[in-house]
Image: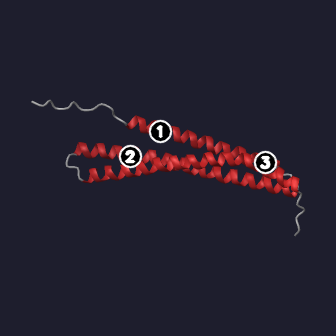
Amino acid sequence: MALPLDPSGITHSIQLAVAPVFLLTAVAGMMGVVAGRLARIIDRGRKVEERALACQEAQELQLALQELAWLRRRGRLANVCIGLLTLCALLIGLTIVVLFVGETLDWATSRWAANGFLTGVLAFMLALLSFFVETLMAMRALDFHMPHARRRS
């Protein structure tokens, strides 16, 4: 099937498709940040598990189990965030393809492109919300009250 290729149409298609690419760059950066946080959550979980296995006191074990439950919730939020970012990237990628193909083949794809883009942006906003909640959880878990150091005699 021979496609009628108009150089000005191709140029316009590329211009339309470039704008969503900037969102893909933001999504990729955000994925890197969230993946790094998830890695730290997993590392911390491993350390707490080791501590829990070596516990001798019931109270210490209880604290370790509470922290593991908290880390599990944070990990789930990070996974949700990564899933939403992946969905966003997929939708934005499809939007770029739809814009390019629609413009090149002169198909009426503007409704599909608009819906795909808006749904992608919505997924990105939900990912930002889950990231925000996870960071709030991380701050809430911090305890800045240091036990009083023993005085040296």
Residue at screen point 30% across, 31% down: 145
Please state which amino acid type lies under the numbered disc 2. Answer: Ala
Of callouts 2 and 1, which one flags the residue occurring earlier in the amino acid sequence?
Answer: 2
Q: Position of residue 126 (x, y in %)?
A: 60, 42
- In this view, the mark in front (3 or 1): 3
Question: Label 3 is placed on what type of residue?
Answer: Leu
> Residue at 74% across / 52% down in the picture?
96
- 7 with respect to 63 (left or right): right
Residue 93 locus on image (x, y percent): 69, 54
Q: CA distance from mark 2 to mark 1?
A: 16 Å
Q: Is residue 52 left or right of residue 32?
A: left
Please tell me which of labels 3 and 1 falls first in the chain: 3
Q: In this rendering, does residue 97 appear at all?
A: yes
Q: Could you tell me which secondary element the residue under label 2 belongs to?
A: helix
Q: Is residue 78 above or below residue 145?
A: below
What residue did someone put label 1 on? 135
Q: Taking the image as drawn, is residue 107 in sight? A: no
Q: How would you rate the neighbour count of disc 2 (Cα within 10 Å): few for under 14, some for 14-19, many for 20 or more?
A: few
Marks 3 and 2: CB-CB under 8 Å? Answer: no
> Answer yes or no: do the residues labelled 2 and 1 have beta carbons within 8 Å?
no
Q: Nearer the viewer, mark 2 or mark 1?
A: 1
Residue wearing tag 2: 69
Q: Mark 3 sits on what residue?
A: 16
Left or right placement of residue 126 versus residue 138 in this view: right
Residue at point 71%, 43% (across, down) = 118
Label 3 Cα neighbours within 10 Å, binned few <14 / some 14-19 / many ≥20: some
